Image (cartoon, grey):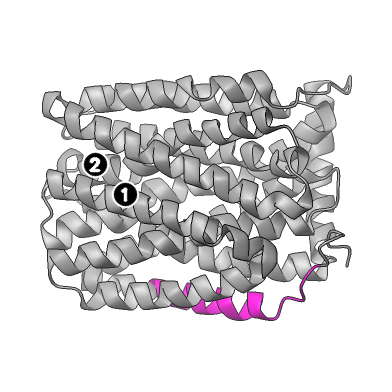
Amino acid sequence: MDRKVIRSWALYDFGNSAFAVLFPFFYGTYYADHIVPEGSAHTGEWWWGLTISVSMLAVALSAPLLGGISDHAGMRKRLLLAYTVLGVLTVLGFTQVGPGMIVLGFVLGVVANFAFEGGIVFYNSYLPQIAPRSHHGRVSALGFAVGYVGSLVALGLAAVLFEWGMELVWIALAVQWALFAIPAFKNLPPDRPTGIGIRQAAAGGFRQTKETIKSVLGMRRMRRFLFGYFFYMDGVNTVIVFAGVYAVGTLDFEAPELLLLMALVQLSALGGSLLMAKPTDVKGPKWVVLRVLLWWILVVTAAHFTESKTMFFVVAVLAGLGLGSIQASSRALMSRLIPKGREAELFGFYALCGKTGAILGPFLFGVLTDAYGARHAILSVIVFYVAGFFLVRGLQDAPASAPDST
């Protein structure tokens, strides 16, 4: 296990986590409250939910196909680079969005989130290649932990630069993302070209996507886990993308309070990812996932009854603990189920399940907020946690020495 490679892999998360925190909290709040004017045909929450849903749909449709191309043509690192460049350039485009520019803000939001989430597919697929199975939990947790530190750095910069204008926040985000991607592109295992052209690889990827679906349906443990992941990540992603909008719209948070809220979430998420790293390897990722899903049900219930800013800060810390734990343990569980040599392909399908689930949740939350208010709409995500819990609970544990084969 090459420590330099692992550090470089984790540093990529340090860079792109600036987007992971500032996009849903800062851009989402700015878009819903300032870009979409009052009196529009649809509220800012509706437009924001649509932005997330459309971008996630694009990722869901493209991830398995591009994962297949990555495997057929040996282009994993080049595809990761392409997504990174697209994301960085689109974030710079945020500097051109002003009040009333609903469509431009929507398009840039969709493209930027598509680039970020799409790149994660190829980033995740390196985990089984750079770390032995016995260390997947710890290395996965390290990636998330370093990412949360990157989020805190981005928040600190945003707190300073916000006073000088939102444009500087987006420029700093783009620089952080690009700068800390460099070690990954330098030190991660190189692409191994297969000699197959892009067109042939695309055709092969399309055929492989169909075969992947058929294969996954025939792999009992993986099939059950991915169905569960589909449901519970819908709830997690919905809470993430609407947390800032909920805080501002329902509890009247001001910008400094929102920055503090985001910082507390990142700190607690860092703690959560580290806290559950050893249990993930010792007790197993399934054991961790089940307990964190129960935790999420309690967090969402508490958010529904919260009426003060102080209590919402407490709820945010509890949510952060659950966020760091569920992300790291889910990735570790998936890596245990993947047959060797199919990492990019099956992590693409993993993204398909997670992102497809995120298509419904944010849009449903936006619609329910229009009809009943955000305080009641937030309860809708509990059903996703419950469904995910029972599906994962019935999952037969995969042996530590072999991937899923049935």
Q: Residue at x 64, y 18 (%)?
A: 186
Residue 138 in the image: x percent, y percent? 63, 51
Magenta includes 395?
Answer: yes
Taking 198 as reference, is 43 left or right? left
Residue 164 in the image: x percent, y percent? 13, 23
Q: In which quarter of the image is residue 66?
A: top right
Taking 328 as reference, is 311 left or right? left
- Label 1 element class: helix
What label does residue 48 carry, if any?
A: 1
Residue 201 in the image: x percent, y percent? 82, 29
The answer to whether residue 116 is above or below residue 212 is: above
Task: Pick the residue in front: 279 or 118.
Answer: 279
The answer to whether residue 113 is above or below residue 400 is: above
- Crowding near pointer 1: few (<14 within 10 Å), some, many (20+)? many
Magenta residues (range): 381-398
Task: Pick the residue in front: 100 or 182.
Answer: 182
Q: Residue at x 29, y 57 (%)?
A: 243
Q: Is residue 370 shown to the viewer in this render?
A: no
Task: Pick the residue in front: 368 or 313.
Answer: 313
Secondary structure mostly seen in the magenta stretch? helix
What label does residue 176 carry, if any?
A: none
Name the residue beneath numbered marker 2: 31
- For the residue marked with disc 1, what is the amino acid? Trp
Q: Quadrant of the C terminus?
A: bottom right
The answer to whether residue 342 is above or below residue 183 is: below
- Label 2 element class: helix
Residue 192 in the image: x percent, y percent? 83, 23
